[in-house]
């Protein structure tokens, strides 16, 4: 992944140096297990424990062998000396590579968890702050009925909680290693050695494997990352719509010195939200590639390997960046309640049509008849101008025989639509969640 989207901690997890260090960790754990069983003599262990792999030397050997694990073993063996014959006993390359990859994913997953938690706290805090910031709800891009900006954010918060559960499950599915040999039969490494090695590395042993850990696990993990990216895209797309000139109910922060366009000095473009939307497409592409990797020839072929060198680092690095960017965006989002109220009233009360319809039904009018009456006045007000929707209803004797003037006026108050906002927030226990997360939030933001 390019440096522009790589945050330092996640970049370190997926660095070549870290990958080689984890390969060494697997080899060390296997050697220790064999030593405890007497297969590796005590005199060899100090040299094995002190083994190092010079990456430049490894690459030099790889140019000759065209095999990175063999190059790794030879470069490492040069630092071990005579005891090198005890390194990699009974293993195949994937025993090392797949187990180390699981360790990298575990490290990356912890960072993603922290990023997702931070974003959830930010979104939840803004939801509470704007619980009663009234705005128009839109369906199909058209004004529908009143809602609040806080409720919109509460929907995002609840979705982020579900994504956290999925990420935890995907991390668990990926946290397995394998030391089962060339075709998974344990012909040269007993299962108890595998279990001991994996436990030492903080992993579970894959219950059954071929030459590799099965790629349904990997496909699921990347699908979850893409799903989280989809949630971020959903949030970013909404901000882009709310920032449109004709709407301008909210917009990205625009710091002093920022410039939105090289040509038009007045522009303040939603470039961060657009970036999130674009990067979400990449995540979906990586997930699709991971799904392609599930079906391999027999006990394993190598068609998945080349793609995983790209899709795992890139997906984790990108999502880490997107979580941080979206959290900053939401935390510093500029909200315009006054403009929200202006837009709420833009249609002259048409958004209360269902409220009128149901009140007529409750007063005894047939529903289909009531629908036609309300629709006739609503469309006339919208298409012809002149008297407002409410005025047209007030001038209709059929309506006013069923509704008093005070009742009709009350139907055009948005508070009628928002009486259960507190109940909705209570359902998702947002206030309790934020209170519980406050110490962690203070640590994250300090």
Image (tube, helix red, strand yellow):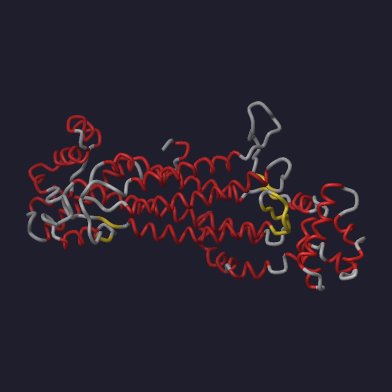
Nearer to us in this view, 224 or 390? 390
Nearer to us in this view, 255 or 282? 282
Q: Is residue 55 above or below residue 106?
A: above
In the image, is 212 to the left or to the right of 278?
A: left
Residue visible at 17% across and 50% down? 49
Residue 262 image point, x, y percent:
63, 27
Using the rendered image of the protein, determine whether residue 9 is visible from the camera's viewpoint: no
Specify the farthest residue to the top.
Answer: 263
Q: Say which quadrant the N terminus sits in.
A: top left
The quadrant holding residue 137 is bottom right
How many numbered badges does the structure rendering display? 0
Q: Is residue 415 above or below residue 389?
A: below
Q: Is residue 184 above or below residue 436?
A: above
In the image, is 77 to the left or to the right of 231?
A: left
The quadrant holding residue 275 is top right
Using the rendered image of the protein, determine whether residue 187 is visible from the camera's viewpoint: yes
The quadrant holding residue 125 is bottom right
Residue visible at 7% across and 59% down? 38
Q: Is residue 309 above or below residue 184?
A: above
In the image, is 328 to the left or to the right of 251?
A: left
Residue 381 image point, x, y percent:
85, 51
Residue 244 image point, x, y percent:
69, 42
Residue 166 image point, x, y percent:
44, 59
Nearer to us in this view, 404 or 190? 404
């Amino acid at each position: 992944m390019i440096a522009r989207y790589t945050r330092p901690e996640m970049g370190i997890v997926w660095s070549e140096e870290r990958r080689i260090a984890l390969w060494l960790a697997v080899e060390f754990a296997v050697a220790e297990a064999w030593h405890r069983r007497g297969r590796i003599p005590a005199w060899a262990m100090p040299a094995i424990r002190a083994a190092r792999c010079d990456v430049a030397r490894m690459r030099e050997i790889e140019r000759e062998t065209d095999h990175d694990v063999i190059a790794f073993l030879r470069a490492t063996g040069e630092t071990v000396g005579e005891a090198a014959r005890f390194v990699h006993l009974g293993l195949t390359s994937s025993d090392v590579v797949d187990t180390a990859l699981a360790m990298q994913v575990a490290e990356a997953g912890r960072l993603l968890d922290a990023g997702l938690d931070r974003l959830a706290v930010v979104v939840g805090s803004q939801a509470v702050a704007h619980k009663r910031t009234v705005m128009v709800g839109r369906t199909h891009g058209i004004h529908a009925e009143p809602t609040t900006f806080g409720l919109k954010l509460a929907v995002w918060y609840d979705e982020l909680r579900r994504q956290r559960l999925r990420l935890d499950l995907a991390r668990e599915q990926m946290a397995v290693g394998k030391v089962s040999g060339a075709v998974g039969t344990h012909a040269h490494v007993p299962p108890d050695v595998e279990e001991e090695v994996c436990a030492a590395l903080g992993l579970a042993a894959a219950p059954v494997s071929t030459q590799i850990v099965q790629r349904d696990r990997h496909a699921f993990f990347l699908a979850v990352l893409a799903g989280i990216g989809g949630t971020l895209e959903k949030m970013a797309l909404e901000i882009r719509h709310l920032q449109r000139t004709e709407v301008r109910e909210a917009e990205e922060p625009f710091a002093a010195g920022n410039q939105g366009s090289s040509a038009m000095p007045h522009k303040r473009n939603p470039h961060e939200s657009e970036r999130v939307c674009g990067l979400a497409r990449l995540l979906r592409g990586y997930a699709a590639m991971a799904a392609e990797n599930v079906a391999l020839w027999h006990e394993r072929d190598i068609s998945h390997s080349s793609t995983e060198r790209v899709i795992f680092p890139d997906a984790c690095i990108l999502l880490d960046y997107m979580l941080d960017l979206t959290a900053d965006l939401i935390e510093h989002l500029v909200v315009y309640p006054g403009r929200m109220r202006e837009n709420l009233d833009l249609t002259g009360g048409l958004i209360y049509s269902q409220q009128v319809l149901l009140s007529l039904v409750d007063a005894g009018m047939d529903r289909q008849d009531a629908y036609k009456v309300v629709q006739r006045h609503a469309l006339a007000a919208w298409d012809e101008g002149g008297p407002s929707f409410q005025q047209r209803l007030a001038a209709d004797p059929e309506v006013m025989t069923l509704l008093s003037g005070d009742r009709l006026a009350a139907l055009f108050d948005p508070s009628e639509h928002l009486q259960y906002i507190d109940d909705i927030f209570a359902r998702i226990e947002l206030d309790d969640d934020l209170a519980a997360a406050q110490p962690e939030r203070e640590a994250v933001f300090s």
